[in-house]
Amino acid sequence: MASLVDRYGRRFPYLRLSLIEACNFRCSYCLPQGYRPRPGLAPPLALAEIRRLIDGFARLGMSKVRLTGGEPSLRRDLGEIIAAIAAVPGVAKVALTSNGVLLQRRIADWHAAGLTHLNVSVDALDRARFAAITGHDRLPVVLDGIDRALALGLAAVKLNAVLLRGLNDDQLPAFLDYLRTRDVGLRFIELMQTGDNRAYFRRHHYRAEALERELQAQGWSLQPRAADAGPARDYAHPDYAGRIGIIAPYSRDFCAGCNRLRVTAGGDLRLCLFGNVGIPLRPLLQADAQAGELQAALTRQLGLKSAGHGLHRGETGLTPHLASLGG
């Protein structure tokens, strides 16, 4: 049976599927002017197309699906999408990455539909700082939604914070206080250069290794990496209920542990977040009878996956901003 393995022996049990490119936040590192549709943008995949896509990946060994955006909660059929994915044989984890604004109202429904894992973007725990970075004064609403998610007993709840020099690099003490009594993961993500943020990147890039050295000095220890985990290097401390993950795309060995593939909201396969090629899968998602053809296309394309990205050389590929593919 064919499987999701590339020519370097890397396995890909993890799919990140963008549901919509639009976002209702104006994060300074992604969409500072707000979302503006790109000319000629294809409409998002419909529910039936998503089901066929996930089934094709699952038949090749994919077991974890993360729904991203833009902001995926802008899809009114998000609950139906979650339920359809959770019902596909072989899918063990259905995750969502969100800005958290709708968690208060919707997280119970999404959990009942089959959502098992949740990541919420929280770039600062200071209300004014959060508003300055995201363009919205919604931190209390987001934090309340996270507490509701924790009360539901999801398998994992994590916070994502993009490291930004001069904007939130002084927030570590507040984040540590938050983790002391909460069983959550906090992931610090090193700012990545994209097609439209070069000046911002030069001004606010903060190396993740500097944060790791600070954590190690405070007694945090590196943990073993799970087989289907993301690229984070996870740290734990005996005095804290929560954990910290560091995502450092500029580290030397970052791509060696790659285990995920991406599909855009319009159905293009991306072998790398910063790759130069998008492979259209939508024509293969129009009928159940195309399942074999879809699987053959996926295994064929994996043979073309590169060993790593070109970020060190300033090559950002097709990604104009992170909302276009969900990071």
Image: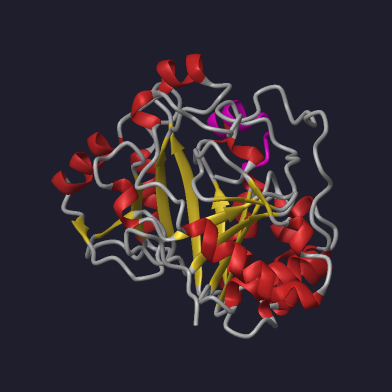
**In the image, what residue occupies the spot 62% across and 44% down?**
278
- Give yes or no for residue 40 being in the magenta stretch: no
- Give yes or no for residue 138 being in the magenta stretch: yes
**In the image, what residue occupies the spot 35% across and 71% down?**
227
Which of 178 and 117 lies nearest the eye of the viewer? 117
Which of 49 and 248 lies nearest the eye of the viewer? 49
The percent coordinates of residue 85 (x first, y second) are 69, 74
Image-based side of 233 in relation to 265, left or right = left
Q: Give the range drawn in magenta.
A: 129-139
Which of 32 and 179 lies nearest the eye of the viewer? 32
Image-based side of 168 in relation to 312, left or right = right
| Magenta portion: prevailing SS class | helix
| Quadrant assignment, res 170 | top left
Is 101 drawn above or below residue 112 in the view shown?
above
| Quadrant assignment, res 34 | top right
**In the image, what residue occupies the spot 49% across and 48% down?**
160
Which of 12 and 323 lies nearest the eye of the viewer? 12
Q: Can residue 118 be seen in this view?
A: no
